[in-house]
């Protein structure tokens, strides 16, 4: 299998499950590219004409009726308090939903919290601007900002044309939150990193470095004026899934640099071949060097609709 793209996903866990299924299957060699839809449902009934998509139910059977994860409730009508240009007729719709990375140091210490972030979705469906309205910890604000920068939308419509929309949303980092709580596998790996249980394998102990199977690049920003280099540590579990990405060390300025959080958010989606020792799949710690090169001519900041007061 060559390069894999995720075109649409309503929830990061749907993306993860689809990649699991894709990499576990056997595909007939073809020349060129193709798309494979995956739908997930709890209640299943055959659609008229039979199934034309793969649908996975919790019991492992196939078939189903799709229900949205609805991770982001967008008002169907824009607030009358917004400027006219932002008063859409049809709201934007999330098309590719990326998860937030719980800041490693806060997760390690069991710190919970939230961040309220405003974002501008431009007529192409990309998030062009963000602003942290409020955050219980600055790191939560950085994480949520990077998360939304990775989202893609079907753009809002105004007078029959794609338009700009101003939205805002609060993300909770809590151990009972559906969208941010670490799963059992992540919690066990976190405990092992803390010295509770068997130590994780390191790169020098592996049969060979695992090959990358799925990679997304961090969101780029042409407004940066300096280069940036740092080392990112990830845990690759026995199935090749990346967990607990974090920067090994750095200054407070590095910890607040948005490029760091974009790298963490992208790395959390990556997939590798399972790390192995003597042929047996193991969880391993890997260190990856990151470098962002500043553009030759940085784009100046251009504050626009983010200055409007976001309201529902």
Image: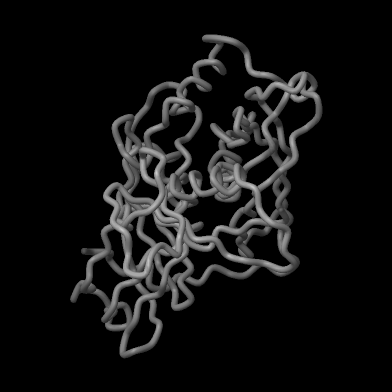
**Residue 133 at x, y = what percent?**
33, 53
Seen at 29% across and 32% down, the residue is: 176
The percent coordinates of residue 256 (x first, y second) are: 53, 43
Look at the picture and state if 207 lies above or below 14.
Answer: above
Estimate the x, y position of residue 306 in percent, counting from the top left: 38, 67
Which quadrant holds residue 200?
Answer: top right
Q: Residue furthest front?
A: 49
Q: Residue at x 61, y 53 (%)?
A: 218
Please tell me in which quadrant of the rendered image residue 267 appears.
top right
- Residue 54, how many percent across, how many down? 46, 56
**Relative to residue 301, is residue 235 depicted above or below?**
above
Q: Is residue 83 above or below residue 292?
A: below
Colour pattern of the rendering: one colour
**The C terminus lies in quadrant:** bottom left
Q: Quadrant of residue 232?
A: top right
Left-right relation of 79 to 106: left
The answer to whether one can see residue 263 in this image is no
Q: Is residue 146 left or right of residue 159?
A: right
Q: Quick one: 48 or 282, which is closer to the camera?
A: 48
The answer to whether any part of residue 187 appears in the image is yes
Q: Is residue 272 above or below residue 277?
A: below
Q: Nearer the viewer, residue 5 or 254?
A: 5
Q: Residue at x 34, y 54 (%)?
A: 64
- Please give the name of the residue rendered at 61% of the width and 46% of the height, measured from the top-left corner: 25
């Amino acid at each position: 299998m060559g390069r894999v793209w995720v075109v649409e996903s309503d929830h990061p866990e749907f993306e993860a499950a689809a990649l699991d299924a894709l990499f576990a299957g056997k595909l007939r060699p073809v020349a060129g590219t193709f798309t494979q839809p995956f739908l997930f449902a709890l209640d299943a009934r055959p659609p008229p004409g039979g199934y034309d998509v793969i649908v996975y139910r919790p019991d492992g059977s196939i078939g189903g009726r799709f229900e949205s994860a609805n991770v982001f409730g967008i008002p169907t009508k824009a607030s009358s308090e917004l400027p006219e240009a932002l008063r859409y007729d049809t709201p934007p719709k999330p098309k590719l939903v990326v998860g937030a990375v719980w800041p490693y140091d806060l997760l390690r210490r069991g710190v919970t919290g939230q961040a309220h972030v405003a974002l501008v979705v431009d007529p192409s469906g990309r998030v062009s601007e963000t602003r942290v309205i409020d955050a219980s910890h600055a790191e939560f604000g950085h994480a949520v900002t990077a998360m939304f920068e990775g989202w893609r939308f079907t753009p809002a419509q105004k007078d029959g044309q794609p338009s700009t929309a101003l939205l805002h949303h609060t993300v909770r980092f809590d151990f009972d939150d559906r969208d941010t709580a670490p799963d059992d596998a992540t919690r066990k790996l976190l405990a092992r990193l803390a010295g509770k249980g068997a130590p994780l394998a390191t790169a020098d102990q592996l049969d060979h470095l695992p090959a990358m199977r799925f990679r997304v690049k961090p969101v780029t920003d042409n407004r940066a004026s300096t280069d940036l280099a740092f080392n990112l540590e990830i845990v690759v579990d026995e199935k090749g899934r990346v967990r607990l990405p974090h920067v090994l060390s750095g200054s407070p300025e590095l910890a607040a640099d948005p490029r760091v959080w974009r790298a963490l958010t992208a790395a959390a989606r990556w997939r590798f071949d399972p790390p192995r020792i003597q042929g047996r799949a193991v969880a391993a710690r890997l260190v990856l060097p990151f470098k962002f090169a500043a553009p030759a001519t940085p784009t100046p900041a251009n504050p626009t609709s983010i200055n409007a007061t976001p309201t529902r």
